[in-house]
Image (spheres, helix red, strand yellow):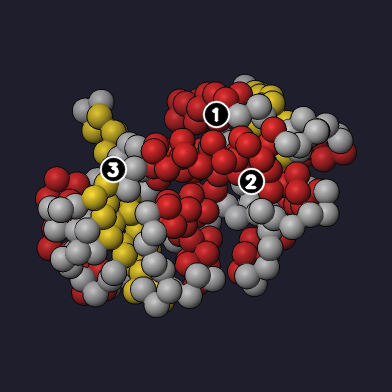
Amino acid sequence: MTKLLNGVDCKNKLKIKLKNKITKIKDKLSITVISVGNNEASKIYIKNKIKECNSINIECKHLHYEKTTTNELIKVIKKLNKDKNTTGILVQLPLPKNINEKLVINSIDKLKDIDGLTETNIAKLYNNEPGIIPCTAKGIIDLLDFYNIELVGKNITIIGRSNLVGKPLFHSLLNKNATVTLCHSKTKNLKSITKKSDIIIVAVGKPNLITNDMVRKNSIIIDVGINRINGKICGDVDFKKVAKKCEYITPVPGGVGPMTVYEVLSNTLDCYKIQQNKNIR
């Protein structure tokens, strides 16, 4: 019988442990989320982050700009870098096209980089050194760990090579001693690769990309895709047909999404510990 990898249940149980750790800290943890423009999806994500932070006694400030420039954003971030009361900084992506996303992200102090997207933290991940890991990649690892799914030696296929998900996830899984294949839009014979996979992780944004005939029996499917069709949200997997064949599968919504938000909280604590010259966890 197929089992759901329930991100909501996992998040809620991990939050209890995380809140217990935070209550033992004398200092007030505080993060600032910066957004530009009026991306509807971003508004929802930020609302969820604020709600989750409040539920675990983390202060969450939101700085929103209708319009701004790269230089102005960097000035704001540098000011927050120096603010001793700011534990972490998060820039909500995507940013408008007139803003240099790379420059903005890398202006964040690596010790306050909640998203783990600065070049310094990405380099630490690639070199398997302690640092802040991007939220979605970390959320997937924690979700698999919560359900006691072994990664050592597993053949894992990632579909999608984005800087937010695919690339950091590739290295996160390598660091767990999995055998990882990273596929993308130019990959040939995708089906021949996925059919050999113990675990398939898809993060493309294309409904029904993964079909029943691409999955071997008793495999594990992680669907990171978010698509809206006729007012309903679905992932990149043909869920109804694929779920009958695999051992575990994430629902959309309710799978990876809640875990990504949870890791914002977890990474905030990690940032604090690093700033206090303590070991992560």
Q: Tell me where residue 242 appears, x and y as whole percent.
A: 16, 54
> What's the distance in space between the residues labelled 1 and 3, CA to CA?
20 Å
State the mark number for residue 52.
1
State the mark number for residue 135.
none
Which residue is painted at 14% across and 58% down in the image?
245
State the mark number for residue 251.
3
Q: Is residue 68 left or right of residue 92?
A: right
Q: Estimate how packed mark 2 is, as few (under 14), some (14 to 19) or many (20 or more) residues with alpha carbons within 10 Å.
A: many
Which numbered disc flags the more N-terminal residue, 2 or 1?
Answer: 1
Q: Is residue 129 above or below residue 33?
A: below
Q: Tell me where residue 263 appears, x and y as whole percent.
A: 55, 44
- Which SS class for mark 3? loop
Which numbered disc flags the more N-terminal residue, 1 or 3?
Answer: 1
Could you tell me the amino acid type at mark 2?
Asn
State the mark number for residue 267.
2
Could you tell me the amino acid type at mark 1?
Glu
Could you tell me the amino acid type at mark 3?
Pro
Depth check: 47 or 177 in front? 177
- Which SS class for mark 1? helix
Q: Estimate how packed mark 1 is, as few (under 14), some (14 to 19) or many (20 or more) residues with alpha carbons within 10 Å.
A: some
Q: Does any portion of residue 269 appear in the rendered image?
A: yes
Which residue is painted at 61% across and 44% down in the image?
266
> What's the distance in space between the residues labelled 2 and 3, CA to CA?
24 Å
- Which SS class for mark 2? helix
Q: Is residue 25 left or right of residue 239?
A: right
> What's the distance in space between the residues labelled 2 and 1, CA to CA?
13 Å
